[in-house]
Structure formats: structure tokens, C-alpha cells
Amino acid sequence: MRYEITQTHVNSFRNNHYIYFEDFFTPDEWAQISVIQKDPAKPLETRRDMFEKDPLWKKLLKKRRFADVLRGLYFKPSVLVAFDQVLMQESTPIYPTEPTPIGEVSCFQKLVAGALIPIEEVTLHLMDAGGPIDYPLKKGSILFFDTRFEIPFGDLTTDPAHHSVLIGFGSMETTYVDNPKDPAGRFLKKYHKWTFGDTLSPDFNPLILRK
């Protein structure tokens, strides 16, 4: 399955800061996504950087269609997965409930894009070039967004029946920094021996696109 990004896609993305694809995943892939770790009783680390723990999830992220979309929208020489994180209702909220850009809540500086994958259907309350809009995300779909897009965390983390996956994409210039607003940023330092100032590396971060 190949995705061709047209100038219409690019223009819409630049105006609205997001682009949505229905049926981005096959039924078999969706079956895999639907069983992603989302047990609130498990430590937060089990729901972060699943590409490290789950080889099938990592393989899915490296599917050609991800590269097709990112190649069409960006002009970076390389794009890597900086992190992935399950969004869900937590006993103690870990993200703000108001819409917030990904850069404000990430321990990675100079991210290039992000994506949301709904595990259950959810309606997002967005603001695009035409004003407020209710935007339903269906199973099997994905929403790519740029770093100016304000993620509606309130829609994604206040319903116990809803779960989604947040993905941050970066380049070789993306840097690990100290950001207290990133709920899982510190465990990179603790468990993976990252130091502030380190940049993304294909030795750890899945390489999605190399031009």
C-alpha cells in the first residue's frame, strides 16, 4: 500500500497543521494495534517507547506508507521515531487537559511532526483554518500533525473507555532535553543512560525515512 501526497494534501496540511487518513492500517495491523499495552495498573514506562519492547510494533512503524507521508510533507534528510506514548485516563493526569503543542510536553527539542492513532473511535475538538470543528477519528485511521498543532489532550485522556497512541517524529538534530512536562522523559536518563544534549540515533530510534 503506497500513499501519494499531492500538493492539495500539502496545502491543507500547511493551512490546518494536520492531515487525516482513514483506513491507513490493514485489519491485521489494526488487530495488533488494538492489543497495545493500556493497563493503568502497569507502570507508565510500559506504555512508552513500545517500539523498543515490541518488534511487531516497531516493524509496523517502519512500513513504507509512513515514509510516503513524511516524505511528502517534510524536506528533512531523515525522519526517526523520537517516542511513542499511549494516551489514556490516568489516576493522576500526566498531560494538560487544554490543547497543547507537542513540543511543550516533550523532552525532545526540534521535533518535526507527530501522529495520533485512535485505538477506539474518538471525536476531537479542533481549530483549523476555517474555525472550530468536531473531527471524528475512526478505527484504522491516523492523524499526522505539525509542531504548531495543539493536541486536544482533554479529548484523549478524560474518558476511561478511550485509548490512543501519540507518536513524535524527529530528525538527527532532535535533542533530548530536561522538560518536567514530559511525564516519561526522565526514565530515558535512568534506564537508557541518555544524557541531556544527546540526539536521536537509528541505533535506538526507528529510522522511518532516509532521503
Image: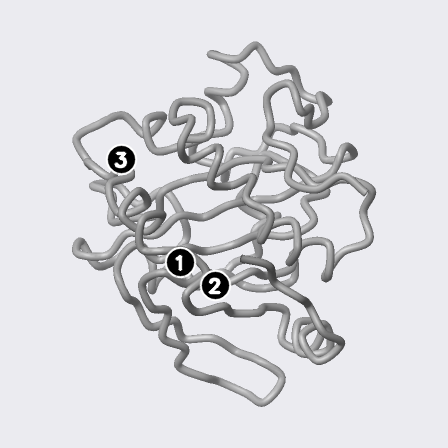
Q: Amino acid at mark 1?
A: Phe
Element under disc 3: loop
Q: Quadrant of residue 136?
A: bottom left
**In this figure, which residue is indicated by the disc labeled 2?**
99
Quadrant of the image containing the C terminus: top right
In the image: residue 71, left or right of residue 33: right
The residue at 36%/60% (across/down) is 140
Element under disc 1: helix
Q: Quadrant of residue 8?
A: bottom right
**Residue 92 image label:** none
- Give the distance between the C-alpha atoms of the residues marked 2 and 1, in whole angstroms: 6 Å
In the image: residue 85, left or right of residue 204: left
Image location (x, y in percent) of residue 85? 42, 40
Image location (x, y in percent) of residue 159? 21, 59
Q: Mark 1 touching mark 3, by CB under 8 A?
A: no
The numbered mark, 2 or 1, whose residue comes first in the sequence reads: 2
Q: Mark 2 touching mark 1, by CB under 8 A?
A: yes
The residue at 52%/20% (across/down) is 188
**In this figure, which residue is indicated by the disc labeled 3?**
37
Q: Height in image: 77 above or below 53?
A: below
Tell me if mark 2 has few (under 14), some (14-19) or many (20+) residues whose alpha carbon lies within 10 angstroms of its own: some
Front tag of 2 and 3: 3
The residue at 49%/60% (across/down) is 151
The residue at 67%/24% (across/down) is 202
Front tag of 1 and 3: 3
**In this figure, which residue is indicated by the disc labeled 1?**
153
Q: Quadrant of residue 77?
A: top right
In the image: residue 209, left or right of residue 120: right
> 18 or 189, which is in the foreground?
18
Image location (x, y in percent) of residue 126? 47, 75
Q: Residue furthest front?
A: 1
